[in-house]
């Protein structure tokens, strides 16, 4: 508060100026110095003077009332009066503030002498509250109101995160971490973890090996010379010689007695199996002391199953039976669609020929499952498609699919009254019993060596036509086939084949050649490149041969081969071999 005598600023709580002693008159801005407001009194008086209206109802009763519009007008007049009085009060406050001036900008503490003889005891405040507005008397009050004052922003408390505060925290963290790491490496690891760790020089050696043509593993357990090591699973003891007790364990030992159910795949053996050996060593007192367990994985091979016919796993046919041929190991268990055919395995050294019944329903599923000794279950799934027939048309199931003659009788049945048309080369079609019994027969003619297709069509009024196909492998006997062969080794036959390849293929011309197998193209079917010059020409005469003989060729060996023309492969003629013999010289 400013002293009116000397102009010295004093604390608001001081009763007198601490410089000159003049009494300070406190001007409290929150208390009005105006006379008592008479607005409410005037409002009540005016409200009593409002005109009163009387309403008379149908029964003659009077009811006084005041018009709401008069009430609203009175309230508006009162509002304007209060507004005027407020503006007058603001003007007086501004004039009073201009006389007193602004509080000092600084919030520094003030001090004064305590003179108890003149003044009473004063309790000074701990601090002077900082002003909430800044301004200067030279530019604030223009036009009777403040234009440049502003509120000071409040200061938010922020915790310091400087390096002086972070370093102690980091030091504590590193100290605790160091204690934990040291405890792990010097206490927990050597006393707990390393107690169960076997030294590397005491670890057993496990090596994959072969024993009696079967997969096995060689186990070498280190120990003291002459010590006896007993294997619980094998029920055998082995002596330590040269620092190790060595023995072999065949892999099938672990699974040969496990039964597999072909219809329940959950009982089938997995591809790999983890096995465990439990070794014991005999101590000096004669007691058996357990050694660490020996664990390793073994692979369980699938049972051998070679599918010979068909060569693909999805086939289309129009016959009621389809011949399936495959090769397995002797003494194997064979199941076809869940039915046991193991009794046929050893009759032909593991070769099985099965005529699968095929119904005209679309896809027929054939599952072949094999379990051989020392092997796990193996399965092959075939899908044989036979279209749905609107007109039933079947061939005699006793028909052979191979022929050494150029013609073969074909017998079949269909719906009585149907019409039969043979679409492949044939002769002597007999339909005398077709209208009554639905039977027919004819002789099929084979125009080339190898596979010939017999095609038959059945028609009936109001029905869709049915067409079936039947393949017959035609190959004359060696005496007939070999006499038709042309030589290809002399150079002229090779050039003639290249020049007239299309004509030779159409007539399935037979060639004889002697040469060495120089390159393997495929194993199934066996395709090999031969040099048929056999030293008779300066240049090589390469031909590609497909092996359909009963002899399996070997790379680098010479053969005398009879084959018929088939086509071209990589700028060399391709032939299909029917007979293989040893060369004469």
Image (cartoon, grey):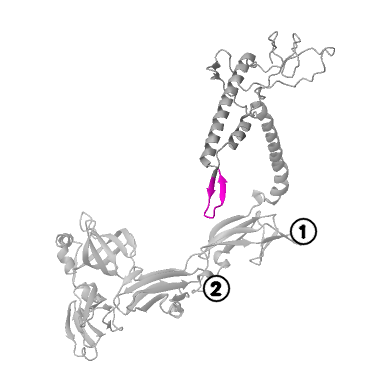
Q: Determine which of the numbered discs, if any, sits on residue 284 in the image.
A: 1
Q: How many C-alpha atoms fall within 10 Å of the one at disc 1: few (<14), some, or many (≥20)? A: few
Nearer to me, 29 or 189: 29
Q: Position of residue 490 (x, y in %)?
A: 18, 61
Q: Position of residue 242 (x, y in %)?
A: 65, 54
Is 83 in the magenta?
A: no
In the picture, measured across the screen, residue 83 lies left or right of residue 181, that is left
In the picture, measured across the screen, residue 195 lies left or right of residue 370, that is right
Determine the secondary structure under disc 1. Answer: loop
Q: Position of residue 463 (x, y in %)?
A: 23, 80
Q: Which residues are magenta?
A: 54-65
Count of numbered circles in the view:
2
Q: Is residue 200 visible?
A: yes
Is 60 in the magenta?
A: yes
Looking at the image, residue 109 lies above or below residue 177: above
Nearer to me, 45 or 460: 45
Alpha carbon distance from label 2 to label 1: 42 Å
Select label 2 or label 1 by which is in front: 2
Determine the secondary structure under disc 2. Answer: loop
Q: Going 32% across and 59% down the picture, which residue do you hit?
A: 520
Residue at far bottom of view: 436
Residue named by callout 2: 259
Nearer to me, 466 or 7: 7
Q: Is residue 550 visible?
A: no
Quadrant location of residue 483?
bottom left
Q: How many C-alpha atoms fall within 10 Å of the one at disc 2: few (<14), some, or many (≥20)? A: few
Q: Determine which of the numbered discs, if any, sits on residue 425 in the image.
A: none
Looking at the image, residue 55 lies above or below residue 118: below
Q: Quadrant of the N terminus?
A: top right
In the picture, measured across the screen, residue 254 lies left or right of residue 21, that is left
């Amino acid at each position: 508060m400013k002293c009116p005598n000397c102009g010295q600023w004093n604390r608001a709580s001081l009763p007198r100026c601490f410089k000159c002693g003049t009494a300070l008159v406190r001007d409290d801005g929150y208390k009005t110095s105006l006379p008592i407001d008479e607005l409410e009194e005037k409002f009540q008086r005016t409200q009593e003077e409002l005109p009163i209206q009387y309403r008379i109802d149908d029964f003659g009763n009077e009811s006084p009332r005041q018009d709401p519009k008069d009430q609203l007008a009175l309230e508006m007049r009162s509002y304007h009066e209060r507004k005027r009085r407020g503006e007058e009060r603001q003007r007086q406050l501004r004039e009073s503030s201009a006389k007193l001036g602004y509080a000092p900008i600084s919030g520094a503490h003030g001090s004064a002498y305590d003179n108890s003889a003149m003044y009473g005891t004063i309790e000074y405040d701990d601090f002077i509250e900082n002003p909430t507005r800044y301004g200067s008397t030279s530019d604030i009050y223009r036009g009777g109101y403040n234009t440049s004052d502003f509120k000071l922003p409040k200061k938010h408390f922020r915790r310091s995160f400087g390096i002086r505060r972070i370093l102690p925290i980091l030091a504590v963290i590193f100290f605790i971490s160091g204690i934990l790491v040291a405890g792990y490496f010097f206490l927990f690891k050597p006393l707990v973890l390393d107690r169960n760790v076997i030294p590397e020089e005491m670890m057993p050696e496990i090596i994959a090996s072969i024993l009696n043509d079967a997969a096995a593993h060689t186990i070498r357990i280190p120990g003291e010379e002459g010590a006896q090591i007993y294997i619980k699973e094998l029920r055998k003891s082995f002596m330590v010689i040269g620092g190790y007790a060595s023995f072999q364990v065949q892999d099938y030992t672990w699974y040969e007695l496990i039964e597999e159910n072909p219809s329940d795949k959950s009982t089938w053996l997995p591809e790999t199996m983890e096995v465990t050996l439990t070794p014991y060593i005999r101590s000096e007192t004669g007691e058996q002391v357990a050694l660490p367990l020996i664990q390793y994985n073994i692979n369980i091979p699938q049972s051998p199953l070679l599918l010979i016919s068909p060569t693909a796993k999805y086939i289309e046919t129009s016959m009621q039976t389809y011949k399936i041929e495959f090769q397995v190991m002797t003494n194997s268990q064979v199941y076809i669609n869940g039915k046991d055919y193991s009794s046929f395995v050893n009759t032909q050294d593991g070769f099985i020929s099965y005529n699968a019944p095929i119904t005209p329903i679309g896809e027929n599923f054939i599952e072949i499952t094999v379990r051989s000794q020392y092997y796990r279950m193996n399965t092959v799934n075939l899908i044989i498609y036979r279209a749905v027939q609107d007109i039933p048309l079947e061939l005699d199931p006793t028909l052979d699919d191979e022929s050494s003659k150029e013609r073969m009788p074909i017998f079949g049945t269909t719906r009585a009254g149907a019409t039969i048309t043979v679409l492949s080369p044939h002769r002597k079609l007999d339909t005398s019993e077709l209208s009554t019994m639905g039977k027919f027969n004819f002789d099929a003619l084979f125009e080339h060596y190898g596979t010939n297709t017999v095609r038959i069509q059945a028609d009936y009024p109001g029905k869709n036509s049915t067409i079936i196909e039947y393949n017959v492998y035609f190959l004359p006997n060696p005496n007939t086939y070999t006499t038709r062969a042309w030589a290809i080794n002399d150079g002229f036959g090779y050039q003639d084949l290249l020049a007239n390849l299309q004509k030779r293929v159409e007539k399935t011309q037979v060639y004889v050649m002697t040469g060495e197998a120089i390159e393997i193209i495929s194993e199934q079917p066996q395709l090999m490149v031969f040099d048929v010059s056999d030293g008779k020409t300066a240049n090589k005469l390469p031909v590609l041969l497909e092996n359909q003989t009963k002899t399996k060729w070997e790379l680098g060996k010479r053969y005398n081969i009879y084959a018929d023309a088939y086509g071209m492969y990589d700028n060399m003629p391709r032939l299909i071999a029917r007979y293989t013999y040893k060369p004469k010289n």
